[in-house]
Image (cartoon, rainbow, N blue to C red):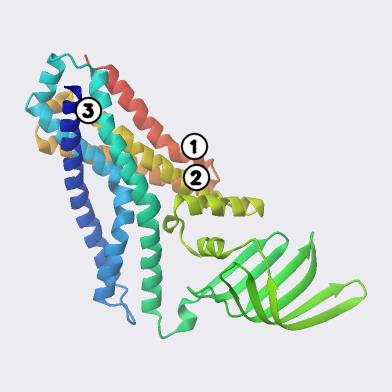
Amino acid sequence: MTGILSQYMMRTILSSTALVLVVLLALAGLFEFIAELDDTQGDYQTAQAILYTLLRLPNLAFEMLPVATLIGSLLGLGALAGNSEIIVMRSAGLSVKELAGMVAISGGVLLVLTGLLGEFIGPPLDFYARNMRVESRYQQDDDSHRNEAWVKDGSTFLHLERVSPELEFGNLYMYRFNGDQLDSIAVAENSGIDENDNWILENLRETQFERDGVQVLTTSRSIESFEVNSDLLGSSLAKPLSLSARELLSYIDYLKRNDLDAIKYETEFWFRVARTSTVLVMPVLALAFVFGSLRSGGAGGRLMIGVVIGLAYYLASETLANSGQVFNLNPIVVTWLPSVVLVAITLFALSRIR
């Protein structure tokens, strides 16, 4: 009997959440498309703007799922409460704890969906969309869209003048240090990374600084092995939200090993984990609300409550995450604080139900 009720509540919550998510994505996609129309140039015209918007939708869905889950759960469970179905369940002997466990199963399903969306679907499509937009806008002007990059490998600093999607860099400048002392400066006329993650430097000219003078070495082709491989280089060029959690962790590890600032990527990683985990809490929070005055209220009242709480959570989490980067606060604390507050509110609200 309990299994049948769990499935029934799950279908109610999932269907309501899916409907809310579709509406939110339609609005977000429309605003994204309108914003892109203001920046059309080159080969980036209306068709490309539509494609860019569609490719961005999975990442937008990942960002909106916590709010959509809350609003959808309020609407779905509120409808059950309005029809006295939840009261009947309580009369049949189900405790508040058991009901909370049932709706938490729905949160668990949405948690898995959110994790898959934010790890395997959204980031790669977002990265492709951004590259497509840049290449379409500046296809006729190589200098306008070239990606310059500085990367560090131990005591060696590399300056890449131009990074193409095929990992060809054009001129590469290499500065080797011994502590605070500059050992050598080298420049390669052309460079790239092969399939084995070896750096191929062509027409390399290196100036070595020695105690008794300066020595210049030239070679037509040099193969170097750096810790920075094609994956790490791609991560350094991509926006944090275009990286999966695995790529974020790998890049954070690289930054820390080279004594570089990783707080922006740590904040994005923990923000993503906290936002995904919050999906599990939202249906239980909605259950606590439908036992109150919302039981007799209409769908409009439930929708308003969901929008207010969802916006408050979204604004608080975004503000704290950005403030943490500005003021160098602990990424774990600032990203998890809104979720912890939501859990505390949920537990308090459930404890008052009789």
Q: Earlier along the polypeptide chain: callout 2 or callout 3?
A: 3
Local crowd at mark 3 within 10 Å, few (<14), some, or many (≥20)? many
In front of the other: label 1 or label 3? 3
Q: Secondary structure at mark 2?
A: helix
Q: Say left or right for 150 vs 354.
A: right
Give the distance between the C-alpha atoms of the residues marked 1 and 3, in whole angstroms.
Answer: 27 Å
Corner quadrant of residue 207 = bottom right
In front of the other: label 2 or label 3? 3
Q: Amino acid at mark 2?
A: Gly
Q: Earlier along the polypeptide chain: callout 1 or callout 3?
A: 3
Q: Secondary structure at mark 1?
A: helix
Specify the quadrant that holds the N terminus: top left
Residue displayed at 41% across by 40% down: 274
Is 275 drawn above or below residue 227 in the view shown? above
Whole-percent x, y for residue 269 in the image:
47, 47
Judging by the rendered image, the residue that carries numbered circle 3 is 287
Q: Amino acid at mark 1?
A: Val
Judging by the rendered image, the residue that carries numbered circle 2 is 324
Res. 333 mark:
1
Whole-percent x, y for residue 307 in the image:
22, 41
Residue displayed at 29% across by 51% down: 61
Give the distance between the C-alpha atoms of the residues marked 1 and 2, in whole angstroms.
Answer: 9 Å
Q: Secondary structure at mark 3?
A: helix
Q: Amino acid at mark 3?
A: Leu
Marks 1 and 3 close (CB-CB < 8 Å):
no
Q: Does the image show residue 242?
A: yes
